Amino acid sequence: MGKTTPKAPSNGLGNQRLKGENFYHDRKKVAYLNMLKTGRPKRNAQGKIVKAAAYQSKLTDPVARVLPNRKWFGNTRVIGQAALEDFRTKLMEKVNDPYQVLMRTNKLPMSLIQTNESDTVKKARILDTSGFDTTFGPKAQRKKPVLSVDSIEKLAKNVDDNLDGYEETKDKNLLSNQQSDYVDVTRDWYFGAGMSKRIWNELYKVIDSSDVVVHVLDARDPLGTRCVHVEKYLQKEAPHKHLIYVLNKVDLVPNWVTARYVKLLSRERPTIAFHASITNSFGKGTLIQLLRQFSKLHSDKKQISVGFIGYPNTGKSSIINTLRKKKVCTVAPLPGETKVWQYITLMRRIYLIDCPGIVQSSVNDTETDIVLKGSIRTNNLESPEDYIDEIINRRVKKEYISKTYNIDNWDDHIDFLTHFAQLTGKLNKGGEPDLHVVSIMVINDFLRGKLPHFKEPPAKIQNPMGNDENPNGIEDANNLKSEAKEENESENTRYAINQEFNKIPVLADYYQYDLVNKEYEEELAEERLKEKEELDKQNEINGDNVANSNDGKDKKKRRRDQKKADNKEAPKILVTKETNSGEQFVSEEPDWDAVFSNVVGEEIPFYDLNKNGDNSDSEKTKNKKEKVQEKYDSELESEVEDSESEEDENSKSKRMTTRKLTKTKNFYQTGNTKNKSRKAKSTNESVDQKIKKLRKPGSWKVAPKK
């Protein structure tokens, strides 16, 4: 038998031994004795603790004491009621101003200055009439409780009067338990489109993920496509998020309607007029400029997210495609095309979020209103002919219907649909008109802008959030005589939002009396006169300053500073406006659509930017320059194609239709670096190196600019 090796102890300590471990005490016994010894502190002969017990040590620093100073015990955070009231009024002005940004809240007791004015039931303010000092305590002035009656006889008289004036029809307790002989007709299933729990969960996910919320409205009916519930939720639960309005489809309404709605809505939130189109858009540069302002405001964040919300079929996905200048979201002229939220990158610091369309349930909205807002797909309607009467008699003028369908006279909507079915050939067996099909055609024409229509803007929006009695919060024009002129001015200028509504291409075929509004033209003329006077004053001030400055160094410095400022500022254009009276006015302002036209989605070949447009060369060198330029352009084009092919390789390749293999590559030209030909030109040379090689000395020269 071989020699056995001793087993190592199972405690993991190896050959290490505790102090005191010997033949009489094993490791376990020594640990037990050490536990008993270390449980008490060690003391010296005088009884003082020399070494404290485990976990029983104490601080040797002296006890801190508060200085006997009056400032530590005085009422330093006391404020009076007058100061609180003044601060409360000033704070409410800032909080209710949509153009003020709330960055962060402090830790002060804000409940002292917050009022509950939004409560429907106001609390009784007893302390205003009688305080605690005059009611309780040694200085109490009240001898008996305050009652509404002085005697029992008066109380009995009040009871008799209440019995005499009682009416059963006004008793709320009886009305709540009243049983009727009829039952309200339930709506069809498709009227719940956009109201499901899944859609609202998608909405709240978009709101939680967004720093800026863009509420997309239909320019034909902006007040009818507002989601007041979402605005209340943002104002109450997320006041730090920015909310802006975007009036989409402004090409379907006259320009004065767009200007009036922008002026009204801009008092509540920043409002932008927009026409979604990848090729010919309006308002794209203004919207990008506003989003860049918000991204600069939140410079502490790496990026900001912008969520687009609104009713179905208002153009949320189309706006995102316009900003990217290519199709990144699926769009269709049907509601409910977007099913879930989607993240899209606009810039390095700005992300866009597409949201499904939501429908706000309102008691005052009828089934006709819901259908004509475009919230329901027309092919799901069981009886679409019921909604034609509203279109041809109230929503659209008769002359536009006659012009579109070539039908001049009709008795009712059934007669109109019959004539329309005969004109279009939509007939069933026996020559009977197919009213169902032609009704869907008319509703689609109404929703897609073939029938010109719009809701005339009100004089004023009284309550932005509205209530149950007045959901849109529209005030009559008779109550607006005392309104100041300053309130009529748009607030968009505070965000440097200034759009030229005359540039909007109106695609709807309106008559002249709808395209022109006299009141709007008068307002435009007044605004132009004011701007002209301000420009004249500014020019006079600048002229006086130039005349007073005689020092040449100051002039040079001023010119240098002006050049720097011009380089930093956005490019400006001179816009010539002309009124109906023939007056012309020139205004200088940044053309944001021109500035941001190539920001996102533009694919400009690099060689177009490098071509020199100077044609001042001599005739001798002209042919040489053309040859070199052609060679240079061909090389750059091949380089652009190579870069595009590299981008295509990253994307998913299409499935091969055949089994043909790709062309083989020569290993000695690509992979074998040792035996690689030194004479072969590299395909990865930069453009600058190619230009240097093409510029041989004496071959041709670039003519100087005149």
Image (cartoon, grey):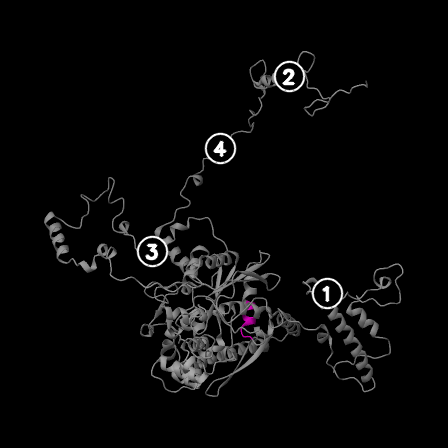
Residue 225 location, x and y as percent?
Answer: 43, 68
285 in the magenta segment: yes
Give the class, few, some or many, for how many residues have Cα within 10 Å of label 3's Cα (few <14, many ≥20): few
Between the C-alphas of marks 1 and 4, the distance is 74 Å
Q: Amino acid at mark 3?
A: Asp
Q: Where does label 3 land, which residue?
A: 119
Disc 1 residue crowd, few under 14, some 14–19, many 20+, Cα 10 Å? few
Which amino acid, by three-letter code, is at mark 2? Answer: Val
Give the vertical position of 318 relative to 578 (above or below). above
Residue identified by numbered label 1: 646
Which is more N-terminal, label 2 or label 1?
Answer: 2
Which of the two labelled residues, at mark 4 and mark 3, occupies the earlier sequence position? 4
Q: Is 353 in front, or is 283?
A: 353
The residue to which callout 4 is attached is 65
Q: Secondary structure at mark 2?
A: helix
Which comes sooner in the sequence, label 3 or label 1?
3
CA neighbours of label 2 inside 10 A, class few (<14), some (14 to 19), many (20+): some
Q: Is residue 201 above or below residue 422?
A: above
Magenta highlight range = 281-289
C-beta proximity under 8 Å, tags 4 and 2: no
Answer yes or no: is residue 358 visible.
Answer: yes
Which residue is label 2 attached to?
30
